[in-house]
Image (cartoon, coloured by chain):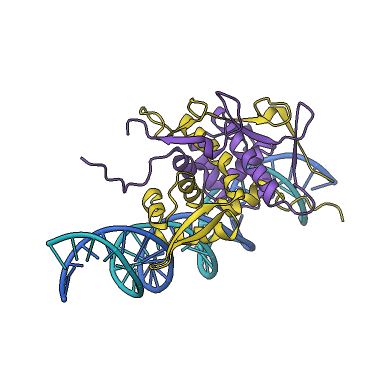
Chain colours: A yellow, B purple, C cyan, D blue
Amino acid sequence: MTAVSSQPRACSVARTLDIVGEKWALLAVREVFLGNRTFDEMVRRTGAPRDTLAARLRTLTGAGILERRQYCEHPARFEYHLTAAGRDLYPVIVTLMRWGDRYLAGDDGPPLVLQHRCGHQVLAQVVCQACGEPLEARDTRALIPGG
Amino acid sequence: MTAVSSQPRACSVARTLDIVGEKWALLAVREVFLGNRTFDEMVRRTGAPRDTLAARLRTLTGAGILERRQYCEHPARFEYHLTAAGRDLYPVIVTLMRWGDRYLAGDDGPPLVLQHRCGHQVLAQVVCQACGEPLEARDTRALIPGG
DNA sequence: CTAGTAAGTCCGGAATCTGGACTCACCATA
DNA sequence: TATGGTGAGTCCAGATTCCGGACTTACTAG
């Protein structure tokens, strides 16, 4: 069988977006990063329809990104916490944020600034872990393992 | 006026996702990064419905992320190219890819590997541009400018 | 003359998203 | 004791999007 080559590409970007690319999903995760862990708080901060947010939180907990913890029995109250996998989404969120800061911020500048413990404003930079150089598309080449 | 605080958060992540967070948008951008610039090629590689892809390409060119260039007059043929803003989405794509490689790759490992010109496999790492330390959520603090 | 490619558009049905109302359980306050 | 508020959802009907597939137009290759 010669390769069909017309199959959609198997790709980690696509797989990741299947989980995290639905509307409101990453904004829910953003809120948890910012410390807003309860359902109602997330509704307020994101503006997502309650229905949709509930569905996203189910997907995200199902995918092992968030964990739903009960912190009060009567009445039942829950908090969402990041798992290790969820914390590893931080790079995705800060790179999205940086792009928006650069290309979509108005005259007022970015609406939210992160401060690093080093004292400076966080400017997320993506580097090659091996050599430490900033990553740019033109410096990379795609290989298909076993292809 | 005491803050209403119930407005959805003004946020660069949200703004960016408004453009780039629709289904198939980032996969179209991924294909352009991989050198597949024509409409039909993108349809084949992403698996997106032609209709939807056409809409996304309009959004992306409208947002200044892609540029539509005619490379043949008769018959009319077009290629999509990244603008500077589009190239700056590379960090978003490689961080998504890295997350997927880590959490969603099967036994076969990642379906696509990027090689850096330094010779190593690209492992995207996000660092604080100021101090060079790898970025983690717990090392950062959110501030609302003028808030 | 038939096939194939490129770049879409058009269509009707399916799936999702949306805002708003509603529920249930509890607490506070007057 | 009635009123209102919070938290965590669910339910619904209507609007919007998404989907696959067929179709179009303009050309080239055999």
Please identify the quadrant where the N terminus of chain B is shown: top left
Determine the residue positioned at 80% across, 51% down.
B108
Between A140 and A93, the residue placed more toward the observer is A93
Q: Position of residue B114 (x, y in %)?
A: 74, 37
Between A37 and A47, the residue placed more toward the observer is A37
Q: Position of residue A4 (x, y in %)?
A: 79, 53
Please identify the quadrant where the C terminus of chain B is shown: top left
Judged from this view, the residue extending furthest toward the right is A1
Res. B135 in view: yes
Would you say C1 lies left or right of B138 here? right
Determine the residue positioned at 53% across, 39% down.
B137
Would you say D6 lies left or right of A102 here? left
Q: Quadrant of residue B79?
A: top right
Give the vertical position of A106 relative to A47 (above or below).
above
Figure label count = 0
Q: Position of residue A92 (x, y in %)?
A: 57, 41
Q: Quadrant of residue B113?
A: top right
Determine the residue positioned at 39% across, 28% down.
A109
Res. A103 in view: no
Would you say C15 lies left or right of A144 here? left
Give the vertical position of B118 relative to B31 (above or below).
above
Q: Position of residue B93 (x, y in %)?
A: 62, 39
Between B102 and B51, the residue placed more toward the observer is B102
